[in-house]
Amino acid sequence: MFIIDDIIFSPIKLVKWIGEKLMEESERELNDDSKIKAELLDLQIRLELEEISEEEYKTKETELLKKLEEINKNK
């Protein structure tokens, strides 16, 4: 009976396992601050190269710092 149960429920277990792995990956991605830090660096470089204005820089910087703060708060 246990072998039949394993055969019947294996697709369900597989879907559950895949769902758990996807959840873990999405949580890890949401809590990864390295992308935001890279965006801040890129933003600084673009400002220094005069590709964006000071106003654009400050707006985007504020947005990125809020995201970074939120990530650090959730850790």
Image (cartoon, rainbow, N blue to C red):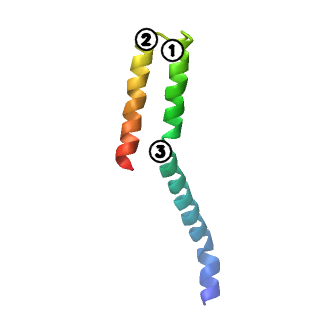
User: In the rendering, at what x and y percent does residue 52 appear?
Assistant: 51, 12
Quadrant of the image for the N terminus? Answer: bottom right
The secondary element bearing badge 2 is classed as: helix
Residue pictured at 57% horizontal, 69% vertical: 12
C-alpha distance separating marks 1 and 3 = 27 Å
Please name whichever residue, 62 or 17, is drawn nearer the observer in this view of the structure.
62
Task: Please name the amino acid that badge 3 sits on.
Answer: Leu
Please name whichever residue, 48 or 70, is drawn nearer the observer in this view of the structure.
48
Residue pictured at 50% horizontal, 20% vertical: 44
> Earlier along the polypeptide chain: callout 2 or callout 3?
3
User: In the rendering, at what x and y percent does residue 25 appear?
Assistant: 54, 52
Q: Tell me if 1 is positioned left or right of 26 in this view.
A: right
The secondary element bearing badge 1 is classed as: helix
> Earlier along the polypeptide chain: callout 1 or callout 3?
3
The secondary element bearing badge 3 is classed as: helix
Location of mark 1 (residue): 47
Q: Is residue 34 above or below residue 3?
A: above
Is the Cβ of the residue at disc 1 closer than 8 Å to that at disc 2? yes
Location of mark 3 (residue): 30
Location of mark 2 (residue): 54
